[in-house]
Amino acid sequence: MSYYSALHLHKEPFSTSPDPEFFFLSSAHQTALHRLEIAIRLRRGLSVILGDVGTGKTTLSRTLLQTLTEEEGFCFHMILDPTYKSEFQFLSQLVKMFSVRPFSRSTLDYKDAIEKYLFQKGVQENKTIILLIDEGQKLTAPFLEILRTLLNYETNEFKLLQLVILAQMELLPRLRKIKNFMDRIGLKYIINPLDEGETRQMIAFRLAQAGFNSGPQLFADDAVRLIFEVTQGYPRRIAILCHQALEQLVMENKPVVDRPMIEGIVRNEVR
């Protein structure tokens, strides 16, 4: 019997891939998503979403992408890892991403070509251009300066580029030292881990999304309580631990994940 059929599932419920279908919208995630949409639709310019590793920032970005690409009028660009050897390489990546042709290979011409692209798309074609940068804590000061320059391109009513930076908390103190960048932030939001109730809801939501709708619950209440204590409410940690628990459940041919099973998994992990 397969893993899925043994658990009455049709998909993996606790994958750590950023699949919007399995994105549990806690109150914090829902607020972040709604505020991001508003900031982008109003073309306010710079939005910064912060959170520790495993709080769901990347999945949030995929959900935002899915939402906006279903509508016309949005040009969505994404950088998953802003690690570049030089400022010119960073600019070259932006030029390539925007499919523009600079007059020559110089920093000035690259910036000029990007500005013309943003004006053509944003004003003449009335498009909303979005650049989303994940792993934003990797942005160095020179790259932040390039982005600050791009945020200067605007009309009397709106910013030509909607920049969304998703980053770990370590970026915040660095941004605070760059006042002319910090002043441009239209939205700053910090995503915190889930509480115990939300942890319970996330587990139930993911199981339901994977097709579980029969019989008693797979996770006992005391098991969920321990999962929360061990993971401290971080969605990625919850998903990893729950996946291990379901594997154990199938191997031991048991009907429910209980607290002793979670305790055993945790003990094996720390050895």
Image: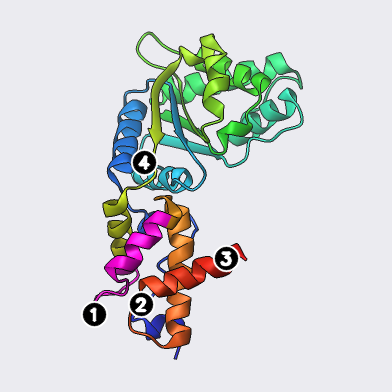
Camera-side residue: 177 or 160? 177
Give the Cα separation between the discs numbered 3 and 1: 31 Å
- Name the residue nearer the viewer: 160 or 62: 62
The C terminus, quarter of image: bottom right
Residue lying at 44% horizontally and 45% vertically, measured from the top left: 55
Name the residue nearer the viewer: 171 or 118.
171
Q: Secondary structure at mark 1?
A: loop
User: Which tag, 2 or 1, sits closer to the chain's start?
Assistant: 2
Q: Is residue 209 visible?
A: no
Question: What percent of the width, then of the height, locates residue 126?
Answer: 38, 25
Find residue 147 and report its image quarter.
top right
C-alpha span from label 2 to label 1: 10 Å
How far apart are the two marked residues, 1 and 4, measured between alpha carbons? 35 Å
Q: Report how far apart the C-alphas of labels 3 and 2 lie in the structure.
A: 26 Å
Find the distance from the CA under tag 4 to the CA under tag 2: 30 Å
Residue 208 magenta-highlighted: yes
**Looking at the picture, does residue 196 appear above or below residue 9?**
above
Which residue is label 1 attached to?
A: 214
How far across and down, in percent of the image, does residue 9 sit? Answer: 36, 77
The quarter in which the N terminus is drawn is bottom left
Assess disc 4: are there few (<14), some (14-19) or many (≥20) residues with their C-alpha within 10 Å of its C-alpha.
Answer: some
- Label 3 packing within 10 angstroms: few (<14), some (14-19), many (20+): few
- Label 2 residue SS: loop
Q: Nearer the viewer, residue 206 or 216?
A: 216
Q: Is residue 135 visible?
A: yes
Q: Which residue is identified by label 2?
A: 9
Range drawn in magenta: 207-229
Q: Which label's residue is closer to the chain start, 3 or 2? A: 2
**Is residue 58 highlighted in magenta?**
no
Whole-percent x and y of residue 29?
34, 42
Q: Residue 197 in the image: state x and y as whole percent.
A: 26, 53
